[in-house]
Image (cartoon, coloured by chain):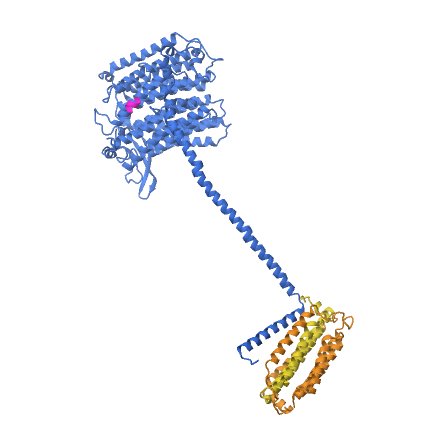
Amino acid sequence: MIHGVGLPFFLASMITLIGALAAATMRNLVHCALSLTVAFGGLALIYLQLDAQFAGFAQILVYIGAVAILVVFAILLTRGVGTTLIHVYAQKWILGLLLAAGVFALLGWAVLTSIPRVAAPEIAVPTVLTIGQSLMHDYVLPLEITAVLLTVALIGAVIVAMPEFKKNGGAE
Amino acid sequence: MDDSPIGINPGNVTQCYVPWIVANLWLIPAIPMVASGLIALLKQPYKRASQALAIGAMAFSFLLSLCAFSRVFLSWHAGTPTRYLFNFDWMSMGASSVQIGWVLDPLAAVMLVMVTFVGSLIFIYSTGYMAHDKNATRFFCFLSLFAGGMLGVIIANSLLLLFMCWEIVGLTSYLLIGFWYHKPSAAAAAKKAFLTTRIGDIFFLLGIVWLFAQTGTTLFYNYGAGAIESSALNTLLHQGAGFGLTAATAIALLIFAGAAGKSGQLPLHVWLPDAMEGPTPVSALIHAATMVAAGVYLVARVYPLMSAGAGPGQTTVALTVVAWIGAATALFGALVAVAQNDIKRILAYSTVSQLGYMMVGLATGGVAVGMFHLITHAFFKALLFLGAGSVIHGCHEEQDIRHMGGLRKAMPVTYATYMVGMLALSGFPLIFSGFWSKDAIVGAAHSWVGSQGPFYMLLTGAVLTAFYMTRQIALVFFGSYRGHGHAHESPLVMTAPLAILAFFAVVLGVLGTPAWPWFTGFLESRPVPFDFAGFSEPGLLPLMAIATVLVFVGLGVGWSLYGARQRKTAEELDPVEQAVPAVAGFLGNRMYFDELYEATVLRWYAWLAALAGWLDVRVWGGAVAAVSLFFRGLGRANKAVDSVWIDGSFDKGCEELVTGGGLLAWMQAGRAPGYLRVLGLGVLILAGIALVAASMSGQVRL
Amino acid sequence: MTPLTAYLLLAAMIFALGLGIALTRRVAILVLIGIELMLNAANLNLIAFWRFGPHPEALTGMMFAIFSIAVAAAEAAVGLGLVIAYHRHARTTDLDAMTRMKG
């Protein structure tokens, strides 16, 4: 369904980029988290354009529905004196900027000088059936491991975030 | 001499009976030495204790000597062999060993008794003489050590042991001559004595080493294997030693050189008169009775060596040399004594002269003749010296006889005993022992096969002896007192030994008369009957008559010059000086022997010493200094290296470490953003490298 | 510019932005946000390469991306739990102040 880099791609990428940029520069943390959500949405659109519908919906469900909410919860739970910070950027933020720019430059150079292919092949759009079959046949092990991992992460997150109980009673 | 002794030889299976005294003969010298050691530990104020120790030790040694003498006497009386040996291994070197030991024979026995007896008397005398000296403890320590050494010389059966004790005796002589060391003349005299006897000792040592090399043993007697027993002597006689001498003669002469040094023979006599700087008991004991007699005793001990090869009616080269030197010494001593004015110096030169007599006696008449005069001389010379000491003590330390006079009334006991001694020394006939002993020597010299020269020299010496002794007696005891202050008699502790010695100076003569030559028989281990027929030996009575006449001539001339015409003042010129001033001056200056030595030997020696000193300071000292400088430089370089490089580098290293640690600490500050940046940087770099490498190698078609 | 290049460039840009957020912001939570963005960029790369690469019927790329999403979610949960725990202890989420290495 891809015929070159058209308007949908441009729009979706713009949404993503602006969301990410906003997350980078906003002062208010909640605003950052919400713009992150926007960026996730943009990415989901791009996945849909790439005939990876399942991935796109999974992106929306998991990232926007869980991760972003989680981030917002964390922000709200860890509020300091005021929600707006005095200093937005860390010390020596220039270095981080330069590093990021350097990484982008490197990746861009690698991308631009290497990919010669032009056309997108036609494929059979993967259905949920095929994905399910693939999960259960070829990727059953990663599936199980991911399940264990999620359980462990759940328990771990609960324990880490749990308030400590002192011997003589009372949560810290 | 009987050549088959009884003794024990450890290692020898056949054991014979050894008398207790022989096995423990070593006690006789050891006890005074131990006493000396104990006295050395006492401090200065313990005068009484040190005196008691010294006299006690000497008395005990005297008792032991009497035991030894009685054992020998009993053996002699029974007609059994009288030489007891006790030899043992001293140093073993593998299979061979050096043996030393001691011997008890008649010669040793009489010497032991004489030395311990006279020594004890002189020790008793010293307590009075040194009563006012605060260093008396040191004095008795040295005296005891000397006594031990001398007794060791007497009993030694080994030349090695004898030499060791000889050196002890020489050392103590040095210490005692220089007893008042703060007097420069005393210190110089001690040095002179030591060095002069040293010259003799060098030759002595050469002789010992040569004898040991030739015979393989230093023992005198060893049941036929000793160094002076017949088998060894045969070996020595048949070996040449250059200059046409046999080895026996050469060794004998070398040993005699040592004896000459110790006994003050010409030309090594120069130390004896100067040795009078020591206290008078020292002069009496060491330089009259015992130490100077050690040389004579040594010659008597090695007499078989000296007389080896001479049949009856012959004499050996060694004995000829001994006789001539002895005669020359006798005459020289008597001549010089005539012109001396110090009471002790007269006696010193008299001793020199008498030692010459003893040597002539040994050389011409054998061991018994020389030894008899040694024994009698010990008594009356000790008597004379002690008497001189008493005189000096009574005249308040005055020693010039021109400042004395008329002391026979002030010091009667001293006068009486001194007269006895003087008459004995002069050889007053019949009553006094000196007559018999000196007459024996003169008789032997007369019948000597070598030459009559020594005989005439001895006769001249006898006249002169009587002359100068009369002079001394007259100037000291007769006339009027020319000194300062008031003379007084000495205390009993000093006069009692004088009396005892005087008694023996008379009585001992009995042992050596021709009618009853007991001494000779005892020494030669044969029985001696009392026989007046001994007087009828041909030529004996005329000789005795000549000797008597000469003695009276000397006494008469002396008395007429000095006794009859007494000098009034101390500064009057001596009659001899007035008559022949040049000769008197020559004699008074001891024939310029000392000056001769000073100009030749001493000058050369001083030059040598200066050279050695220069070498030591410049050359050896320079070498040592150079080595030390080198090492100091090395040390300094080491220190520089250490402080600059090693320390500096270490400090720098530590500084860098601290800086690095600070750096690391800064890096480990826990700043998460920093870590993230580093991570990002690392990723960037790694990815970059990977991509560039991949594109370079063509794996990725970029 | 091929479509693949475009997608890859977009992914690179998102990645760089995520890295920038992680390295320059002061708040700990924003670092986690940056990490999420980076993960998303990587997912995009995966999907793009799956779509334009050989054998898209093997579903390898998409599976990988799906698993990546799951893991990222778990990791976000744990990370945010850590931040909350730290905040409880030190009352701040300022990264520059989180320098004490003693617990």
Q: Chain A is drawn in which colour?
A: orange
Question: Which quadrant of the rendered structure holds the C terminus of chain C?
Answer: bottom right
Q: Nearer the viewer, residue B660 or B180?
A: B660
Q: Nearer the viewer, residue C47 or A150?
A: C47
Which residues are the magenta region? B322-326
Tell me: residue B356, above or below residue B239. Answer: above
Q: B625 left or right of B355?
A: right
Q: B377 left or right of C101?
A: left
Question: Which quadrant of the rendered structure holds the N terminus of chain C?
Answer: bottom right
Is residue B128 part of the magenta span, yes or no?
no
Instruction: Determine the image quadrant of residue B220.
Output: top left
Q: Colour of chain B?
A: blue
Q: B702 left or right of C69?
A: left
Instruction: Determine the image quadrant of residue B615.
Output: top left
Q: B416 left or right of A28?
A: left
Q: Nearer the viewer, residue B58 or B201?
A: B201
